Image (tube, grey):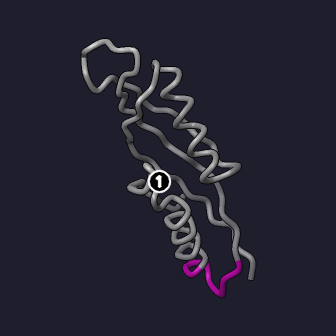
Amino acid sequence: MEHIVKLRGQGRVEVAAYGVADAEHQVEKELAALWPGALVDILEVGRVDADGRIVEEFRVGYRVRGSVSGTADTEEDARKAALRRLREAFAGSRFARIAWEVV
């Protein structure tokens, strides 16, 4: 049986960037590549160090939302499969520690 599972993930990463807009753009672009079609919200951006440099370290808080479809016998199996699929997709990236929840 086909199921659609709505998921949301949230986390924080450190990014080397030329400014706030560049840090936001990098996070949005990388998340979109890992989960095409998902909605990405940047929640906060802050400098890691107070020192001004050409390339600075930023801490970026984000939220990503979307749906995963799949075939499973029960809704619970579909939720487990969707979470497993996203964890595998994000493994090895700077977003591997994202906190997922089913909505």
As drawn, 77 above or below 61 = below
Residue name at image x 41 percent, y 34 percent: 15
How far across and how far down the image is residue 87, in percent?
Answer: 49, 65
Q: Secondary structure at mark 1?
A: loop
Residue name at image x 36 percent, y 32 percent: 59
Residue that lies at the very extreme toward the left in this rendered image: 50
Residue that lies at the very extreme toward the bottom in this rendered image: 73
Can residue 103 be found in the magenta stretch?
no
Residue that lies at the very extreme toward the top in this rendered image: 52
Report the front residue among 90 and 41. Answer: 90
From which residue to which does the magenta span run? 71-77
Rate crowding at label 1 as few (under 14), some (14 to 19) or many (20 or more) other CA atoms within 10 Å: few
Q: Quadrant of the N terminus?
A: bottom right
How far across and how far down the image is residue 31, in percent?
Answer: 57, 45
Residue name at image x 25 percent, y 16 percent: 50
| Residue 25: quarter of image | top right
Report the front residue among 15 and 81. Answer: 15
| Residue 44: quarter of image | top left
How far across and how far down the image is residue 70, in percent?
Answer: 69, 74
How far across and how far down the image is residue 77, in percent?
Answer: 57, 81
Task: Determine whether, in the image, residue 36 is placed left or right of residue 102.
Answer: right
How many callouts does the rendering have?
1
Which residue matches tag 1?
Answer: 93
Can residue 75 be found in the magenta stretch?
yes
Report the front residue among 67 and 19. Answer: 19
Instruction: Give, as a three-letter code, the residue at label 1.
Output: Ser
Residue name at image x 41 percent, y 36 percent: 61
Task: Determine whether, in the image, residue 87 is placed left or right of residue 55.
Answer: right
